[in-house]
């Protein structure tokens, strides 16, 4: 019987019990009606002893009852007669119904429900037994059948028995045979027993023989079980003086090598046990008791039992009556008692010895190249304890192609599939074998492995938002699967040796991907392709081990062409071009916004002017850029021409022209000469208009060459940083002069030479002086912290100024040495009486550092060991080294004041005087005291803490508690912008004549300075 059926049966027990509830109600109703004939009825088993006496008693009782009923009727009122009639009728109906029911039930025997608990109070087992009389002559013979069901240790057992009992006046002798069936374990047993009972004593003997052979145990894995042969001797004894209390004695013996007499965990060989029990029966229906079993090897067990003993045909009133217990202990009262035997089959066990077999959870797997199989493949054996190790065998090709198998503690296999090999079946058979503890091998379990090629199920191209670097980028997304393209997607899986590339190869195209690559949650491999150059129909290829080279699609960067424009058109040389067979090549440069050239791209280019003067023509025009993004066109002329505006346009855009018109001239450098005009080179400042050089051009006879284009070149071609040529002319004026201006945004202290050439640099003419550029410096004072300091030679002011180049309005570069533009005595300190620092006593300024700091800043530190008031500080930028006549001194807007530490006063004339009253808890009296020198000059922003202790206290009031007064210091140890120290006076209670006192105590010794406020009242 399965556990499910057992649970259903137990749940059904309440319904069986409910069948008896109506009979309880009937019996109670009969009692309520004073039907005493039902209360005095005995069990059918006792009627054969007292039948004649009962018959006489019943007759007398009936006569008495009828006489009493008639008397009650005659003495009752009409309403009482109605109620008595109802009661009488109901009593008769209940009596008849109960009597017929009890007659029907009397043909059955006894039912017993048993619940047994272990010493921990846990329900150990439960049972239901039913004795059914088959033949009963109510005298000396009884033939019966006994049925039983029990649940113990998760097993369901059914008992079916037949027996007979022979009764003498003093003893009962019985024989019985039982068939026991363990539904859970499918075990069967035959039992034969004998009984010998008398009053207050029951003796039983039973023997048991197995009917089934060894079979697998449902609970003990690796074990077999069968019923154990054995016998038992049982005795029950009751006290005649107190029949409610009884005892048990028993002995059991079973035979086998591993008999579970107590439980499966305590198997023994040929075990036996002794049993001692004690029970108590308060009423016939209920028996409670405890059994103690003691066996060999120290095994013991204690069971607490609760039995429900229901006797069919016996009124409930008797089954609940304590007085009826005594009759149960007599031979007559126990006529229908259940057979006492061990209804639970005792099992013998042995370890199961069987052929070791191995089983794989999967017999075939299909994967892709070098796939790590996502889950281990479980390996199971029918006797795992005998498995020593798992051996796997595969062909050499499996391992040579990268396949690998490992065993996980003989529980599972971890697989890495081989490479997919082109033009091969890619099928492998792996033999998995178990070796037992004796070194024997099982039959191999076969695992069939098939490797399919990787495939691209889908290829997508997604545009990436434009970056600031001007490159255009796309995400290349290849969704991977294996075998056919519609199989499962390979998600979140790493791949080594992934390769992406573009054809045709282009150095301006970059491809980036993770190494190793890994598919995302959608099974996509990702690569990013970027280009700063336009590109059309670039083919995308992907190669993965196990897939081979595969073309995925095309990618285009043609939209990038719109980012490129014609930036400039440059002539072959500065100045006029010579007439003749000379080819003059003009260059057009195409770049994007980031200045990157358009490389090796064919474009639609047009050169201007389209209509050229006579003798002038275009030739060798290119329409494909080179690596520098350049396009070229050659212009030549057979005749002089002036004012030709040369330019070009790309893709129909706006034309871009050269800076100057182009002129063709016949003049030969061999027929002219040039020289610098006599000039004195002044100091040239950065950021100014610069200096203009003048060159006079003449023929060999010295006559000025007027209003002619000249092919002149100015040197040096490579200028120092920040220096540039401007306003360069190539046509002489009426005096035959040409001009060029040189300027700079940065200081150049190392002189460099200026030269000219009329023959392309073969012969150069040098300017007589070297050229330098210098900063034109101005100083801008920076805000400073306002302070009054002690004249102790230690405390100091720090003044900062920003040095700016006047020409460029930019701060001087960090690290520039100051002596390049500032005279040694650059800092000045002037007192209010007009004395400068070098004569004002006590002032000691020094410059720090020697170079310009960040953002063009310089600093000066000023301290003094003597008092000085309102010292004005300035910075002198000296230009004398450049020939300037005057120095420029820039003064700071703030003053510096130094005071002697002993020249501190508290000015009581300035103290705030309040005469009005204040409200307690709401108003504060604010006091301010000025800190001055001996000349009563206020000392703002003076930190007194180095030489004085500042303390505010309260004076004793004329009335009230001084402890109610408190002072809040507002300014601390530093005076404010008006030289005041400030505090608040508060009170938490009414006070009159309250005062606040300020005391400055010299730290280095001396008399303290004290000032006291005017008294105020708090109401």
Image: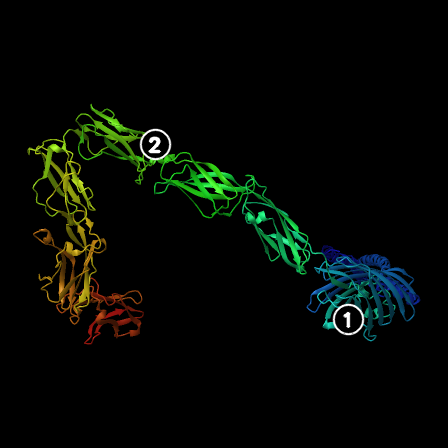
Name the image colouring: rainbow
Report the mark closest to the observer, 2 or 1: 2
| Mark 1 crowdedness (10 Å alpha carbons): few <14, some 14-19, many ≥20 | some
* 589 w.r.t. 112: above or below: above
What residue lies at 33% left-to-right and 36% top-to-bottom? 599
Mark positioned earlier in the residue sequence (2 or 1)? 1
Give the residue at mark 1. Answer: 273
Q: Helix or strand or loop: what does disc 2 sit on?
A: loop
Q: Please provide percent x and percent y for residue 62.
A: 89, 63
Give the quadrant of the N terminus.
Answer: bottom right
* 849 w.r.t. 550: above or below: below
Tag 2 and tag 1, C-beta contact below 8 Å: no
Residue 393 appears left or right of 864: right
Whether residue 993 is visible to the viewer of this picture, yes or no, is no
Which sits in the foreground, 422 or 965?
422
Give the quadrant of the C terminus.
Answer: bottom left
Q: Residue 602's mark?
A: 2
User: What is the CA distance from the residue labelled 2 to the residue labelled 1?
Assistant: 109 Å
Q: Helix or strand or loop: what does disc 1 sit on?
A: strand
Q: Residue 922's mark?
A: none
């Amino acid at each position: 019987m399965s556990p499910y059926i057992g649970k259903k049966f137990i749940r059904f027990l309440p319904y069986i019990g409910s069948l008896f509830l109506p009979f309880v109600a009937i019996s109670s109703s009969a009692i309520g009606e004073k039907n005493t004939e039902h209360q005095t009825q005995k069990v059918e088993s006792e009627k054969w002893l007292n039948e004649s006496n009962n018959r006489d008693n019943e007759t007398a009782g009936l006569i008495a009852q009828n006489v009493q009923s008639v008397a009650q009727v005659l003495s009752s009122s009409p309403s009482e007669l109605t109620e008595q009639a109802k009661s009488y009728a109901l009593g008769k109906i209940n009596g008849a119904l109960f009597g017929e029911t009890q007659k029907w039930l009397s043909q059955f025997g006894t039912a017993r429900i048993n619940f047994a608990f272990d010493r921990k109070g846990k329900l150990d087992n439960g049972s239901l037994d039913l004795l059914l009389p088959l033949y009963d002559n109510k005298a000396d013979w009884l033939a019966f059948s006994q049925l039983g069901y029990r649940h113990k240790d998760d097993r369901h057992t059914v008992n079916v028995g037949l027996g007979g009992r022979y009764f003498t006046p003093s003893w009962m002798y019985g024989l019985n045979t039982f068939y026991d069936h363990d539904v859970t374990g499918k075990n069967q047993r035959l039992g034969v027993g004998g009984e010998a009972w008398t009053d207050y004593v029951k003796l039983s003997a039973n023997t048991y023989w197995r009917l089934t052979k060894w079979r697998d145990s449902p609970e003990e894995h690796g074990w077999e079980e069968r019923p154990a042969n054995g016998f038992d001797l049982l005795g029950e004894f009751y006290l005649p003086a107190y029949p409610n209390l009884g005892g048990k004695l028993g002995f059991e013996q079973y035979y086998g090598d591993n008999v579970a007499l107590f439980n499966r965990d305590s198997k023994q060989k040929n075990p036996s046990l002794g049993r001692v029990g004690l029970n108590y029966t308060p009423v016939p229906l209920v028996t409670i008791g405890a059994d103690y079993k003691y066996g060999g090897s120290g095994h013991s067990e204690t069971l607490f039992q609760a039995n429900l003993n229901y006797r069919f045909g016996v009124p409930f009133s008797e089954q609940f009556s304590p007085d009826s217990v005594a009759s149960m202990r007599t031979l007559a009262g126990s006529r229908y008692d259940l057979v006492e035997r061990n209804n639970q089959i005792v099992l013998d066990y042995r370890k199961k010895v069987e052929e070791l077999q191995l089983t794989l959870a999967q017999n075939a797997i299909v994967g892709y190249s070098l796939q790590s199989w996502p889950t281990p493949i479980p390996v199971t054996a029918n006797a795992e304890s005998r498995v020593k190790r798992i051996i796997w065998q595969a062909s050499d090709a499996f391992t040579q192609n990268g396949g690998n198998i490992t065993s996980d503690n003989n529980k599972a296999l971890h697989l890495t599939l081989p490479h997919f090999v082109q033009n091969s079946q890619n099928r492998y058979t792996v033999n998995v074998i178990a070796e037992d503890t004796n070194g024997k091998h099982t039959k191999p379990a076969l695992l069939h492995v098939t490797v399919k090629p990787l495939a691209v199920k889908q290829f997508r191209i997604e545009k990436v938002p434009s970056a600031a670097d001007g490159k255009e980028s796309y995400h290349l997304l290849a969704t991977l699967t294996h075998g056919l393209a519609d199989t499962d997607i390979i998600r979140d899986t790493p791949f080594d040796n992934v390769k992406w590339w573009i054809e045709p190869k282009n150095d301006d195209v970059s491809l980036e991907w993770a190494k190793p690559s890994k598919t995302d949650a959608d099974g996509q491999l990702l690569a990013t392709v970027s280009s700063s150059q336009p590109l059309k129909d670039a083919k995308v290829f992907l190669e993965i081990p196990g897939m081979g080279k595969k073309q995925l699609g095309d990618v285009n960067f043609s939209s990038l062409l719109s980012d490129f424009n014609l930036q400039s058109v440059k002539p072959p040389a500065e100045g006029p071009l010579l007439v003749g067979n000379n080819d003059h090549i003009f260059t057009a440069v195409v770049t994007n916004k980031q200045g990157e050239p358009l490389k090796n791209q064919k474009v639609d280019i047009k050169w201007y002017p389209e209509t050229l003067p006579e003798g002038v023509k275009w030739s060798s025009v290119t329409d494909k850029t080179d690596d520098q993004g350049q396009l070229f066109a050659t212009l030549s002329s057979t005749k002089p021409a002036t004012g030709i505006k040369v330019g070009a346009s790309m893709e129909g855009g706006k034309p871009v022209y050269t800076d100057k018109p182009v002129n063709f001239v016949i003049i030969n450098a061999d027929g002219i000469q040039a020289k610098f005009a006599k000039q004195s080179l002044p100091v040239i400042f950065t950021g100014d208009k610069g200096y203009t050089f003048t060159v006079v051009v003449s023929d060999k006879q010295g006559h000025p060459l007027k209003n002619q284009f000249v092919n002149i070149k100015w040197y040096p071609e490579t200028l120092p940083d920040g220096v540039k040529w401007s306003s360069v002319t190539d046509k002489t004026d009426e005096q035959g002069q040409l001009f060029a201006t040189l300027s700079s945004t940065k200081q150049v202290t190392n002189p460099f030479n200026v030269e000219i050439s009329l023959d392309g640099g073969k012969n150069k003419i040098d300017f007589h002086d070297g050229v330098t550029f210098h900063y034109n410096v101005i100083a801008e004072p920076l805000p400073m912290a306002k302070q009054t300091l002690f004249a102790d030679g230690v405390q100091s002011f720090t003044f900062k100024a920003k040095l700016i180049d006047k020409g460029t309005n930019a701060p001087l570069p960090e690290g520039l040495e100051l002596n390049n533009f500032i005279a040694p005595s650059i800092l000045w300190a002037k007192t209010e009486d007009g004395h400068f620092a070098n004569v004002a006593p006590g002032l000691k300024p020094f410059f720090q550092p020697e170079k310009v700091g960040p953002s063009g800043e310089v600093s000066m530190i000023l301290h003094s060991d003597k008092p000085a008031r309102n010292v004005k500080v300035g910075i002198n930028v000296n230009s004398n080294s450049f020939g300037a006549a005057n120095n420029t001194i820039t003064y700071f807007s703030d003053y510096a004041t130094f005071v002697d530490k002993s020249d501190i006063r508290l000015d009581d004339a300035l103290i705030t005087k309040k005469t009005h009253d204040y409200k307690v808890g709401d108003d504060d009296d604010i006091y301010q005291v000025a800190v001055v020198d001996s000349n009563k000059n206020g000392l703002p922003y003076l930190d007194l803490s180095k030489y004085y202790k500042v303390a505010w206290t309260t004076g004793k009031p004329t009335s009230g508690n001084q402890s109610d007064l408190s002072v809040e210091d507002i300014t601390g140890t530093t005076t404010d912008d008006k030289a005041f120290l400030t505090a608040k006076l508060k009170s938490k209670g009414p006070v009159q004549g309250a005062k606040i006192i300020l005391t400055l105590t010299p730290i280095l010794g001396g008399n303290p300075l004290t000032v006291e406020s005017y008294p105020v009242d708090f109401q």
